[in-house]
Amino acid sequence: MTFRVQLLWVSEDGAEERREVLEIERGALAMETLGLTLAEGKAVLHEVQRCVVAQQVADDLERQRACPDCGTRHTSKGQGSIEVQTVFGPVALPNPRWNRCSCRTTGPQTFRPTTTWLRGQTSPALLVPTVPRSSCLTPDFLMLSASCGISFRRRGAEMRAPFNGHPGLPLRRCAQPLHDAMGGA
């Protein structure tokens, strides 16, 4: 049996475009062949992310290609790419350098259109705040931990802040992103 995972997107003008993400072959049913493997699941998510990002960036670059003042298309000074870390793995983005339009007399001669939205090279979803170790054992932190039901470890011994007497709360450790403590990737 063959399974094909495809991504279909519809542009603003209603045109549809389809791209094959992954093809999976499965033989006789067994526990080992039931569903997707972890590697296949990760590959699907990474490829979907790559396709979605590529289309978003292509559409944005096309929208910015014309000068907002006179409508003339910006000419290309050079091509480039930049790698951005996303929650489903790194993705390469086109990062062209365009010449400034002749109707503009001030400012730099060239510019990169992706700088209008690209802030850094890491997806905000990966930037999980952490609690500095030095603040973990202050009275204020312990009181906040107790009121929020947070637990943490200190030198190998678990210290759980009670939350209405409910012991089954997830374990969070100081200076560790929440998604790591919750078993995330």
Image (cartoon, rainbow, N blue to C red):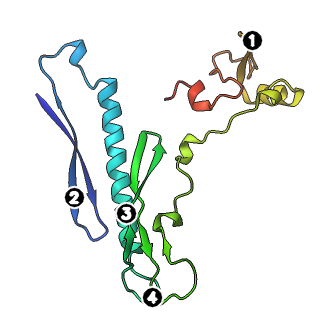
Q: Position of residue 10 (x, y in %)?
A: 27, 61
Give the residue displayed 53% in from the left and 46% down from the top: 122
> Considering only order in the chain, which callout, 1 or 4, is on the residue closer to the N terminus?
4
> Considering only order in the chain, which callout, 3 or 1, is on the residue closer to the N terminus?
3
Closest to the observer, 43 or 113: 113
Label 4 crowd bin: few (<14), some (14–19), many (20+), radius 10 Å: few
Question: Which amino acid, mark 4?
Answer: Ser
The image quarter in which residue 71 lies: bottom left
- For disc 1, the marked residue is 155
Q: Is residue 59 left or right of residue 168?
A: left
Question: Which amino acid, mark 2?
Answer: Glu
Q: CA distance from mark 2 to mark 3?
A: 25 Å
Give the residue displayed 38% in from the left and 53% down from the top: 53
- For disc 4, the marked residue is 102
Closest to the observer, 31 or 134: 134
- For disc 2, the marked residue is 17
- Tag in front: 2 or 3: 3
Label 1 SS: loop
Label 3 crowd bin: few (<14), some (14–19), many (20+), radius 10 Å: few
